[in-house]
């Protein structure tokens, strides 16, 4: 939506995947990866300066994620249990792009020894790798000889 502040549309971003899995019971991604993004994104989203670490003239990351054992400073709670993000509505693009059950999510959950997410194969959820089952023949479509 041109001209709309990213934080204003954050509430409308819930995907079908997010409705199948509550990330507030996990947080593994927030404690597994460096969250780097174009530096101007922090200003555009209104991220607090204390949560932004400058990496280069062009890139920044969320504080705490540029470490040998990354953990975003905005993450509150215990990974694998009850967690929350202090800047969820202002989170940068890498956080918005990661989806429950995608490759990055699976990698983070494995690192934290959390069970893999299983998405029902009948669901078609953007960003999720669900098993593809052959479609049965439609009952109304039969060979007419």
Image (cartoon, helix red, strand yellow):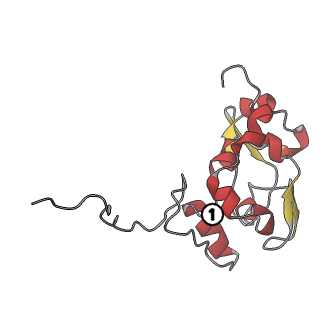
- Residue 138, relative to residue 97: is it above or below? below
Answer with left or right where residue 21 lies relative to residue 120: right
Q: Residue at x 86, y 53 (%)?
A: 74
Can residue 33 be seen by looking at this rendering? Answer: no
Please name whichever residue, 127 or 40, is drawn nearer the observer in this view of the structure.
127
Name the quadrant of the C terminus: bottom left
* Among the 4 quarters of the image, the one containing residue 6: top right
Callout 1: few (<14), some (14-19), or many (20+) C-alpha neighbours within 10 Å? many
Please name whichever residue, 105 or 10, is drawn nearer the observer in this view of the structure.
10
Mark 1 element type: helix
Please name whichever residue, 101 or 110, is drawn nearer the observer in this view of the structure.
101
* Among the 4 quarters of the image, the one containing residue 10: top right
Count of numbered circles in the view = 1
Q: Residue at x 61, y 72 (%)?
A: 117
- Residue 72, relative to residue 117: is it above or below? above
Residue at the outermost left position: 145
- Image position, residue 104 (x, y; %): 59, 61
Residue at the outermost front position: 145
Residue of label 1: 105
- Image position, residue 87 (x, y; %): 85, 46
Answer with left or right where residue 79 lies relative to residue 102: right
Q: Residue at x 40, y 66 (%)?
A: 132
* Among the 4 quarters of the image, the one containing residue 61: top right
Name the quadrant of the N terminus: top right
Can residue 68 be seen by looking at this rendering? Answer: yes
Please name whichever residue, 90 or 62, is drawn nearer the observer in this view of the structure.
90
- Image position, residue 72 (x, y; %): 80, 56
Q: Residue at x 22, y 61 (%)?
A: 142
- Image position, residue 75 (x, y; %): 85, 58
């Amino acid at each position: 939506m041109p001209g709309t502040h990213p934080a204003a549309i954050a509430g409308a971003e819930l995907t079908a995947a997010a409705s199948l899995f509550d990330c507030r019971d996990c947080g593994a991604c927030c404690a597994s990866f460096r969250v780097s993004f174009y530096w101007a994104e922090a200003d555009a989203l209104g991220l607090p300066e204390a949560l932004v670490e400058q990496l280069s003239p062009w890139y920044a990351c969320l504080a705490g994620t540029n470490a040998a054992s990354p953990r975003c400073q905005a993450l509150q709670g215990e990974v694998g249990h009850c967690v929350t993000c202090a800047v969820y509505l202002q989170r940068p693009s890498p956080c918005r792009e990661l989806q429950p059950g995608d490759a990055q999510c699976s990698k983070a959950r494995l690192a934290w020894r959390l069970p893999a997410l299983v998405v029902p194969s009948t669901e078609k959820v953007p960003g999720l790798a669900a098993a593809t089952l052959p479609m049965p023949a439609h009952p109304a479509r039969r060979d007419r000889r």
